[in-house]
């Protein structure tokens, strides 16, 4: 399992565009993605669940990636998160 953390820098927080990017990236890999914020978690491919996390500017999310291609998948997700 690989764990990434990311602090939300967008003034709009974790919004529809960023959620769609995360879910799209998660769908590309065999590994499972779990995104957590505070006491909530969502499947990385679940757009509604990701929106429901309610992460705002300055909040930190945790992305857990687990599976056979987790090393490669985590590199791509880390790159995506740096752009958000």
Image: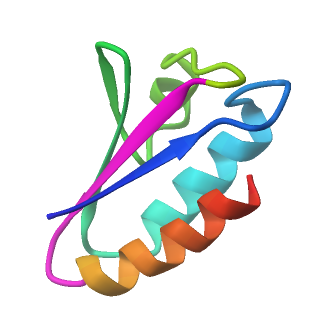
Q: Position of residue 58 (x, y in %)?
A: 66, 25
Q: Position of residue 52 (x, y in %)?
A: 51, 16
Question: Image point 36% across, 86% down: which residue?
Answer: 72
Q: In the figure, is residue 71 to the left or right of 58? A: left
Determine whether 55 is above or below 84 in the image.
Answer: above
Query: Does the stretch in magenta take in 60?
Result: yes
Question: Image point 57% across, 15% down: which residue?
Answer: 54
* Secondary structure that dominates the magenta span: strand
Q: Position of residue 19 (x, y in %)?
A: 64, 41
Question: Image point 83% across, 24% down: which residue?
Answer: 12
* Towards the viewer: 79 or 52: 79
Give the magenta part as a residue range. Answer: 59-69
Query: Does the stretch in magenta take in 73?
Result: no
Quarter of the N terminus within the rendering? bottom left
Number of disc labels: 0
Determine whether 14 is above or below 76 in the image.
Answer: above
Q: In the figure, is residue 23 to the left or right of 82? A: left
Residue sitting at the far right: 11
């Amino acid at each position: 399992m690989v764990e990434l953390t990311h602090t939300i820098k967008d003034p709009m927080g974790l919004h529809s565009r960023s959620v769609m990017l995360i879910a799209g990236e998660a769908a590309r890999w065999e590994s499972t993605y779990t995104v957590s914020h505070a006491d909530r978690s969502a499947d990385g491919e679940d757009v509604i669940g990701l929106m429901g996390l309610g992460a705002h500017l300055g909040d930190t999310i945790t992305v857990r990636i687990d599976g056979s291609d987790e090393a490669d998948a985590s590199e791509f997700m880390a790159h995506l998160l740096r752009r958000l």
